């Protein structure tokens, strides 16, 4: 899927080094609810099954490549749909942009592209995400894309010996036509 400045693409075996680096970056474990490092073997197994569709895996990870004319193509992040629920037409969404590429609009463009994909191809009704209450960058990013705070989980995350609240955000992307019984 090509946008103005980025391309969303399926992961390739050549992405293993980047995924290994990103998945094992301890500073982001709190965001992704990770507690232990990922082995190269586990990531290789994941990549071997990445070709399976979202209905089989219940998740979809896409790599985000920057394609600006003045720069060579560079993989700068990932965007995920997870906890895919075909019965209820919903999925969770998460995004990672590497630190040196943050604040340049790439995350915003990727979110807009995945919302369109979720609506047009997956026929999803809604997307949701969970964001720590002190993660103002992520909160602002998702609010910009019409995600609304629908709940607050008090003292939900225990990080560095402190409790943090977590917001649940939701975006209805396809209005229901109504159900008649």
Image: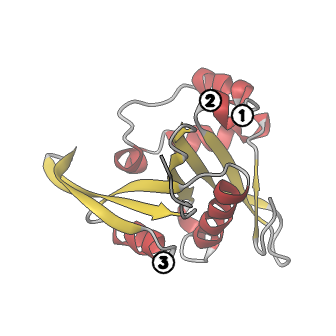
Quadrant containing the N terminus in the rendered view: bottom right
Mark 3 or 2 closer to N-term?
2
**In the picture shown, does residue 72 fall above or below 155?**
below
Residue 34 in picture, x, y percent from top left? 39, 37
In the rendered structure, the answer to whether residue 171 lies left or right of residue 167 reads: right
What's the CA distance linking mark 1 and mark 3?
29 Å
Q: Residue at x 50, y 51 (%)?
A: 180
In the rendered structure, the answer to whether residue 165 lies left or right of residue 132 reads: left
98 or 60, which lies in front? 60
The residue to which callout 1 is attached is 53
Q: Residue at x 38, y 69 (%)?
A: 148
Q: Residues within 10 Å of mark 1 (few under 14, many from 20)?
A: few
The residue to which callout 2 is attached is 57
What's the CA distance linking mark 2 and mark 1?
6 Å
Which quarter of the figure has residue 140?
bottom left
Which mark, by number, is residue 144? 3
Residue 125 in picture, x, y percent from top left? 55, 55
Residue 55 in picture, x, y percent from top left? 65, 33
Q: Residue at x 42, y 60 (%)?
A: 170
């Amino acid at each position: 899927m090509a946008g103005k400045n980025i391309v969303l693409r399926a992961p390739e075996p050549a992405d293993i080094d980047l995924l290994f680096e990103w998945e094992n970056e301890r500073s982001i474990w709190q965001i992704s609810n990770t507690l232990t490092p990922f082995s190269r073997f586990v990531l290789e197994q994941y990549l071997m099954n990445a070709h399976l569709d979202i209905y089989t895996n219940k998740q979809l990870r896409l790599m985000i490549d920057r394609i600006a004319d003045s720069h060579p193509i560079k993989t700068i992040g990932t965007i995920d749909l997870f906890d895919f629920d075909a019965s209820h037409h919903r999925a969770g969404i998460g995004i990672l942009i590497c630190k040196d590429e943050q604040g340049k609009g790439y995350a915003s463009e990727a979110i807009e592209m995945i919302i369109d994909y979720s609506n047009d191809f997956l026929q999803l009704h809604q997307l949701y995400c969970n964001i720590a209450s002190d993660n103002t960058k992520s909160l602002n990013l998702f609010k910009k894309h019409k995600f609304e705070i629908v709940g607050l989980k008090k003292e939900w995350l225990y990080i560095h010996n402190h409790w943090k609240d977590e917001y649940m955000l939701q975006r209805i992307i396809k209005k229901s036509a109504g159900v008649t019984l």
